């Protein structure tokens, strides 16, 4: 079972975790990406996220399907936010439930790493003294 979403609205961490709960799951791994206040020695004012939404959703669905075939996981949630986000806000949540923790951990890490490489969502870092589009590499 999967839940894939791109939204300009704030992401709800607790509802994402609740969605992944399952009597079959012995573990749930959660990745919450947050906007940090510094990068490369510069003060971050905000981040701007843009997406090619239809393609991004398809790529996120491919990642979720891959997780379900590579690992014995039960549920996969991948939600990403677009628009302008302030320091401390949440641009991405990934939740994976599985019978055993190793599968949940491995699948969740693979999901975020693959998302950053393949999903057409772009991030612009806005600093006190300028701005810069970030390459897709973590």
Image (spheres, rainbow, N blue to C red):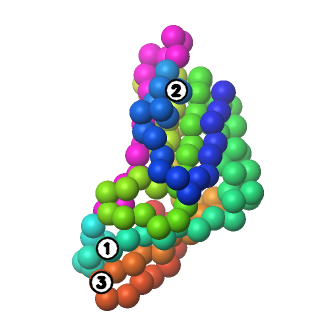
Q: Name the residue under label 2.
A: 20
Residue 128 tag number: 3
* Residue 93: x %, y % from top left: 48, 45
Left/right of residue 73 with respect to residue 61 in the rendered view = left
Label 1 crowd (10 A; few <14 / some 14-19 / many >=20): many
Q: Is mark 1 on a helix, strand or loop?
A: strand
- Stretch of the chain drawn in magenta: 22-36
Which residue lies at the image location 56% right of the left edge and 57% below the top edge?
8
Q: What element carries label 2?
A: helix
* Residue 74: x %, y % from top left: 59, 23
Mark 1 vs mark 3: which is more N-terminal? 1
Which residue lies at the image location 53% right of the left edge and 27% below the top edge?
19
| In-front residue for pair 95/128 | 128
Which residue lies at the image location 53% right of the left edge and 12% below the top edge?
24
Left/right of residue 105 with respect to residue 136 in the rendered view = left
Residue 74 showing in the rendered view? yes
Q: Mark 1 points at which residue?
A: 44
Outermost residue, front direction?
A: 9
| Mark 3 or mark 2, whichever is nearer to me | 3
Mark 3 vs mark 2: which is more N-terminal? 2
Name above or below for residue 22 compared with residue 10.
Answer: above
Name above or below for residue 107 compared with residue 20.
Answer: below
Left/right of residue 30 with respect to residue 122 in the rendered view = left
Name above or below for residue 17 compared with residue 63.
Answer: above
| In-front residue for pair 55/116 | 55
Q: Quadrant of the N terminus?
A: top right
Residue 137 tag number: none
14 magenta-colored: no
């Amino acid at each position: 079972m999967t839940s894939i979403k791109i939204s300009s609205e704030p992401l709800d961490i607790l509802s994402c975790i609740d969605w992944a709960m399952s009597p079959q799951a012995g573990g749930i791994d959660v990745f919450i990406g947050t906007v940090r206040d510094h990068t490369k020695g510069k003060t971050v004012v905000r981040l701007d996220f843009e997406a090619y939404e239809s393609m991004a959703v398809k790529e996120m669905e491919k990642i979720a399907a891959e997780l379900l075939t590579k690992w014995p996981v039960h549920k996969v949630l991948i939600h990403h936010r677009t628009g302008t986000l302030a320091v401390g806000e949440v641009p991405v949540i990934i939740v994976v439930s599985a019978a055993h923790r190793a599968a949940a951990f491995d699948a969740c890490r693979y999901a975020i790493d693959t998302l950053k490489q393949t999903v057409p969502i772009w991030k612009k870092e806005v600093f006190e003294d300028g701005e810069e589009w970030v390459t897709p590499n973590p």
